[in-house]
């Protein structure tokens, strides 16, 4: 892959998303949100790729994956008026179909086309399938981190939260015990469990367990995302437990520099 390919993909993306704009800002704002998200994820991807000194070819590939990772969101909103995958099916799969139908990746060798499509397909799964290896695994891990880093930015930023229509949950800072148990036991939190904005923030916090790169973990600490999310919890014994838990977890991660998503820390804070 080369710079000309990436420029071509960027032009294609810009024309594709423009097609969905209607001129009615109340509708277009939904598409603009995803365009802005894509731009930020692209920057995150480039920074992660740079932090691990990827070769230029893979740096460009990482940027192309971030550019296209949510391409399915546009058709999803157009067809269903919703970004809820539980109601519409996976937006990642929709994105893969858009790229395949348009044949926009045809200028790349087959291996690179398949890395892009697979990384997009896996970007929102609860975990990457265990059989995925090599460059596909690397790029899948990279887009998942880049996407999560933007999730942390959005959920800790009141202006962004408003844009994402999370307002109905804003006033409710109580948490569901099931969600708290998952967090304490280092288990993934199911979207179906989310009842309050506080739950939604705890779901985001649990995603820290799934970060793959040291750059991502350092950024999470530097930006104070964990503190901001934990501070949202009402005063309770769980709040203090979770605070110490994450301090310990991240310190240990720094020492081991391991990308493993397994977690045995639930025992330590019970
Ligand atoms: Fe996505």
Image (spheres, rainbow, N blue to C red):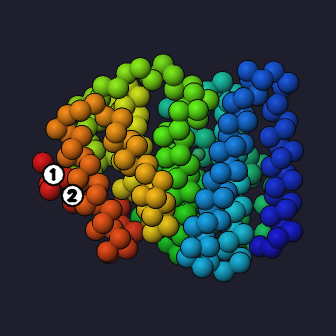
Residue beneath label 1, please? 269
Residue 175, horizontal then vertical, whole percent: 29, 29
- Say if residue 117 shows up in the picture: no
Can you say whether 66 is above or below 54 in the image? above
The reply to whether the C-beta atoms of the residues labelled 1 and 2 are less than 8 Å apart is yes
Residue 83 appears at what percent x and percent y?
59, 32
Q: CA distance from mark 1 to mark 2?
A: 7 Å
Picture mark count: 2
Q: Which mark is residue 147?
A: none
Q: Residue placed at 81% from the left, 58% from the top?
A: 9
* Residue corresponding to mark 2: 265
* Quadrant of the image occupied by residue 17: top right
Horizontal side of 191 relative to 35 (left or right) equals left
Q: Nearer the viewer, residue 6 or 163?
A: 163
Asked if 69 appears above or below 250 in the picture, the reply is above
Q: Is residue 257 visible?
A: yes
The image shows residue 241 at horizontal and vertical percentages of 19, 46
Q: Is residue 111 left or right of residue 210?
A: right
Residue 130: % across, % down: 41, 64
Residue at image position (84%, 25%) is: 22
Give left or right: position of 153 versus 131. right
The residue positioned 41% from the left and 20% from the top of the image is 171
The relative height of residue 172 versus residue 50 in the rendered view (above or below) is: above
At 69% from the left and 63% from the top, the residue drawn is 63
- SS for dot 1: helix
Quarter containing ligand 1? Answer: top right
């Amino acid at each position: 892959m080369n710079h000309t390919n990436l420029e071509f993909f960027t032009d294609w993306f810009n024309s594709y998303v423009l097609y969905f704009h209607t001129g009615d800002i109340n509708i277009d704002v939904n598409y603009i949100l995803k365009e802005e998200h894509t731009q930020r994820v692209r920057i995150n991807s480039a920074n992660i790729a740079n932090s691990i000194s990827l070769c230029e070819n893979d740096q460009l590939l990482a940027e192309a994956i971030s550019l296209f990772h949510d391409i399915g969101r546009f058709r999803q909103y157009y067809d269903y008026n919703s970004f809820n995958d539980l109601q519409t099916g996976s937006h990642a799969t929709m994105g893969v179909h858009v790229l395949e139908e348009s044949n926009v990746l045809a200028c790349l060798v087959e291996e690179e086309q398949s890395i892009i499509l697979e990384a997009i397909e896996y970007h929102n799964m609860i975990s990457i399938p265990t059989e995925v290896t090599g460059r596909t695994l690397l790029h899948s891990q990279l887009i998942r981190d880049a996407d999560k880093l933007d999730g942390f930015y959005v959920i800790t930023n009141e202006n962004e939260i408003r844009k994402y229509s999370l307002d109905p949950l804003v006033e409710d800072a109580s948490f569901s015990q099931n969600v708290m148990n998952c967090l304490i036991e280092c288990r993934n939190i199911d979207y179906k469990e989310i009842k309050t904005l506080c739950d939604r923030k705890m779901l985001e916090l649990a995603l820290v367990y799934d970060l793959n790169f040291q750059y991502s973990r350092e950024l999470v600490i530097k930006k104070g995302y964990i503190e901001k999310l934990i501070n949202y919890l009402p005063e309770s014994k769980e709040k203090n437990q979770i605070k110490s838990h994450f301090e310990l977890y991240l310190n240990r991660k720094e020492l081991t520099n391991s990308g493993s998503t397994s977690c045995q820390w639930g025992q330590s804070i019970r």
